[in-house]
């Protein structure tokens, strides 16, 4: 998912998404507001957080469209929203690449208080309620004979050169339908500080005719198609009958001990879902509801 959902990078160690320093000194604790004051301000329990006045985010410095150091990602924008709605003075980041060890070296080490995007169900963090749901998608140029294809099982895909990132959920479905024989495999682990995102590379390869289609995580497909001005068909793969599931609920991740902070974030999500959706749709993220219907506003 992301790079993939953060479960990718930690579970893959996120398919990759398949994804505590010491307590503050007693003198510093005396400067913190009381739990009651913090809750009244919408800050969660002050004692749970690294800093109750600043939203401290654990993030990858080069993982568009999710986060980057210049604040251009949609998770950067969501962090600004959360900060505003919880009375934070500002947002600060602990930067660490989303690879194996991401959670251990950031959130679990008390270097930050929130991971903005994390697939629901991963045990490395405590999940908030989901704030969006998306899926892997089939992407192809319009008018290339794939109109109407809604599943990886469709015979129209046989013999096609389809791009896919190694070890992600779609590879199992593609293998079951003998599509890996002609697939172009893209690496899962890349240093995006030095090389482009594989999402960007796949879309460019498709536009150059190097591949006929791609199966990729929806937020990446939507973002890079929009960025590159590509007239592409993007089909959420929500009708697969066998193999790995293609859709995932994305949450915010907090420490398992941070119960009041989780409740605060759940309230922010509940009260601001429409604005959250607008931010995601600005980045062309394919959003789907619990019945697999597209969300367009």
Image: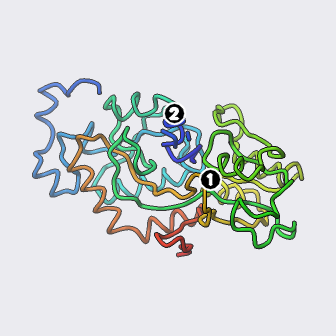
Left-right relation of 138 to 92:
right
- Residue at the far right: name it: 209
Q: What is the x, y in percent for residue 150?
A: 69, 68
State the residue position of label 1. Answer: 217
Give the residue pinned by disc 2.
13
Residue, x 46% and y 62% (percent of image)?
Answer: 132
Q: Percent from the top left, x then y, of residue 71?
A: 53, 47
Describe the colour scheme in one phrase.
rainbow
Question: What residue is rendered at 78% in x and 61% in y?
Answer: 140
Q: What is the x, y in percent for residue 210? A: 88, 48
Of residues 61 and 258, which is closer to you in this image? 258
Q: Up-down: is 103 above or below 143? A: above
Decide: marks 2, 1 in contact (CB < 8 A)?
no
**Gap in angstroms between the C-alphas marked 2 and 1:** 17 Å
Is 235 displayed left or right of 131 in the figure? right
From the top left corner, tell me how far across and down residue 199 is, in percent.
69, 48
Instruction: Sort mark 2 into few (<14), some (14-19) or many (20+) by Cα contacts within 10 Å.
Output: some
Q: Would you place residue 139 above or below residue 210 in this image?
A: below
Reading the chain from its start, which is encountered first: label 2 or label 1?
Answer: 2
- How crowded is the residue under tag 1: few (<14 C-alpha within 10 Å), some, or many (20+)? many
User: Going by the image, does 107 lie left or right of 285?
Assistant: left
Residue under the point 32% across and 69% down: 271
Q: Is mark 2 on a helix, strand or loop?
A: loop
Residue located 52% across and 38% down the image? 60
């Amino acid at each position: 998912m992301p790079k993939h959902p953060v479960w990718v990078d930690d579970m893959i160690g996120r398919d990759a998404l398949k994804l505590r320093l010491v307590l503050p000194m007693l003198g510093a604790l005396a400067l913190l507001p009381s739990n009651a004051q913090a809750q009244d301000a919408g800050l969660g329990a002050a004692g749970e957080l690294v800093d109750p006045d600043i939203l401290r985010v654990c993030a990858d410095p080069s993982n568009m469209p999710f986060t980057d150091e210049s604040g251009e990602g949609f998770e950067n924008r969501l962090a600004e929203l959360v900060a505003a709605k919880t009375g934070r003075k500002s947002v600060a980041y602990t930067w660490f690449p989303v690879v194996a060890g991401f959670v251990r070296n950031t959130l679990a080490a008390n270097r930050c208080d929130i991971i903005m995007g994390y697939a629901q169900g991963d045990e490395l963090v405590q999940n908030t309620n989901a704030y969006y749901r998306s899926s892997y998608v089939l992407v192809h140029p319009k008018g290339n004979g794939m109109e109407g294809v809604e599943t990886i099982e469709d015979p129209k895909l046989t013999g096609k050169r389809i791009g896919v990132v190694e070890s992600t959920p779609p590879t199992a479905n593609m293998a079951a339908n003998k599509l890996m024989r002609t697939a172009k495999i893209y690496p899962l682990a890349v240093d995006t500080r030095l090389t482009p995102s594989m999402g960007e590379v796949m879309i460019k390869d498709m536009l150059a005719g190097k591949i006929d289609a791609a199966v990729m995580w929806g937020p990446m497909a939507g973002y890079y198609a929009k960025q590159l001005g590509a007239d592409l068909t993007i089909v959420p793969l929500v009708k697969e009958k066998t193999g790995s599931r293609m859709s995932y609920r994305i949450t915010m991740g907090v420490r398992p001990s941070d119960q009041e902070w989780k409740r605060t974030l759940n309230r922010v999500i509940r009260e601001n879902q429409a604005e959250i959706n607008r931010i995601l749709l600005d980045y062309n993220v394919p959003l789907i509801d619990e019945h697999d219907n597209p969300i367009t506003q």
